[in-house]
Amino acid sequence: PECAGGGRVKSDMTVALDLRRALIAPPVLFSAGALVRVRTRPGVARLLTEDDPRILEETESSLGIRIEIVSDETLDGEG
């Protein structure tokens, strides 16, 4: 990951928790039962699907949605 000139790069865990906060923050832009597709850098995708899937599972459960994580190597830095 690169900092894109900001001087810092967020850790994969920080990005994952930021994603969770963004999904649960009002106004919720999707309805219960929806499939929400999220593109993120490979490290965050791996963290959410393999290393600590609890974050994703708890978010899906609390919102009543399915979240599909898409690993995107073109995203780096903060994405």
Image (cartoon, rainbow, N blue to C red):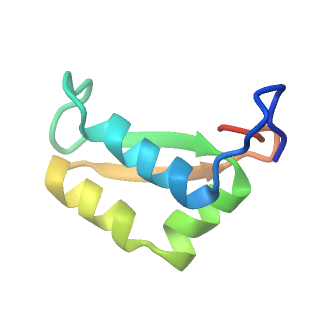
Q: Estimate the x, y position of residue 31 in percent, counting from the top left.
A: 18, 32
Left or right relative to 48: residue 28: left
Which residue is depicted at the point 24% across and 48% down? 65
Q: Residue at x 39, y 40 (%)?
A: 36
Depth order, front residue of 26/71: 26
Towards the viewer: 13 or 58: 13
* Relative height, residue 3 to residue 5 (above, below): below
Relative to 4, is 47 above or below? Answer: below
Quarter of the image for residue 51 reads bottom right
Is residue 35 shown left or right of residue 44? left
**Residue found farthest to the front:** 7
Residue at 64%, 55% (x, y): give it. Answer: 11
Relative horizontal placement of residue 30, taking residue 7 as reference (left or right): left
Q: Dividing the picture into quarters, in which one does residue 75 lie?
A: top right
Q: Position of residue 60 (x, y in %)?
A: 26, 56
Above or below, 36 relative to 70 = above
Q: Residue at x 52, y 53 (%)?
A: 14
Q: Position of residue 55 (x, y in %)?
A: 36, 64
